[in-house]
Image: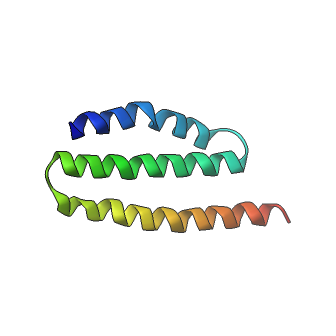
């Protein structure tokens, strides 16, 4: 069941996020980046549950923290270009 959920997330939610992150204005790319990060975290969680290895959840936790820091940096760079 968890493997099906992981594949569904990868097939259904990842391509629109990648497309949005690679095209358009910088604000749209930021939203796409956040979408890809959220889907990746969910896939990591479901794969951890599918493998019955809850110790792998630390990878998803670290990704959330790093993605938050990356978003702050990306936002700072967007704001620097507006000056």
Give residue 74's position: percent from left, percent from top: 63, 61
User: With 15 as the anchor, is 73 left or right in this view?
Assistant: right
| Rendered position, 57 above or below 51 | below
Q: Is 83 situated left or right of 21 in this image?
A: right
Instruction: Give percent across and percent down for residue 41.
Output: 38, 53
Q: How is the image coloured?
A: rainbow
Give the residue displayed 53% in from the left and 68% down from the top: 69
Q: Is residue 54 left or right of 67 when viewed as pictured?
A: left
Task: Look at 18% across and 45% down and name the residue there.
Answer: 50
Image quadrant where one finds the C terminus: bottom right
Q: Is residue 66 above or below residue 14?
A: below
Quarter of the figure with the N terminus? top left
Using the image as rendered, state which of residue 41 and residue 82 is in the foreground. 41
Task: Place residue 54 in its image quadrant.
Answer: bottom left
- Tell me residue 14's x, y (percent): 45, 38
Tell me what residue is drawn at x 54 percent, y 64 percent: 70
Residue farthest along the front direction in this orientation: 1
Q: Residue furthest right?
A: 83
Quarter assignment of residue 71? bottom right
């Amino acid at each position: 069941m968890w493997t099906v959920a992981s594949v569904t997330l990868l097939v259904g939610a990842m391509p629109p996020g990648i497309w949005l992150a690679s095209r358009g204005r910088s604000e749209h790319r930021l939203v796409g980046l956040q979408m890809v990060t959220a889907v990746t975290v969910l896939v990591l969680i479901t794969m951890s549950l599918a493998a019955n290895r809850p110790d792998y959840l630390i990878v998803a936790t670290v990704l959330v923290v790093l993605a938050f820091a990356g978003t702050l940096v990306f936002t700072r760079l967007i704001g620097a270009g507006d000056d």
